Image (cartoon, grey):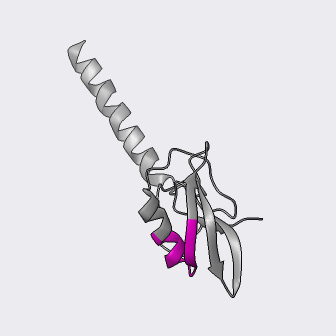
Amino acid sequence: MKNFLLAAASLALLTSASFAQSQPAQSGPNNSAVNSSGQNNSSVPVAGANSFTESQAKSRIEDAGYTNVTALKKDDNGVWRGKADKGGASRDVSVDFQGNVNPAN
């Protein structure tokens, strides 16, 4: 009986390992906590627990080409919101927990 259980467990491991290898990697808008600069995966802020500090959020906005970043505050959805200049115009901007920088719509 012990050999049967050992054989069954080995077969289960081999089957699950080959199944996992045959599946393509999943991708989508929620696949990473932080995106590299310039690679938004969403055109709107994504709600979630945001671990960025105020200065980190400001840096993300500046890295996206904005200047004069002011009035940053984290909202109830974990999204940093503030004002910044780009292209000669002042606009509302946001940084979500994934690092997506978006102008207000």
As drawn, which residue projects farthest toward the front?
Answer: 71
Q: Is residue 74 magenta?
A: no
**Residue 53 visible from this viewpoint:** yes
Viewer-closest of 82 and 7: 82
Percent position of residue 32, x then y: 48, 56
Viewport quadrant of the N terminus: top left
Chain part drawn in magenta: 59-70
Left or right: residue 8 versus residue 52 is left
Viewport quadrant of the C terminus: bottom right
As drawn, which residue projects farthest toward the top?
Answer: 1
Viewer-closest of 63 and 37: 63
With respect to residue 67, does 7 lie above or below? above
Instruction: Tell me what residue is drawn at x 63 percent, y 68 percent.
Output: 83
Percent position of residue 104, x then y: 73, 65
Percent position of residue 30, x then y: 57, 53
With respect to residue 4, does 53 lie above or below? below
Instruction: Tell me what residue is drawn at x 68 percent, y 87 percent.
Output: 87
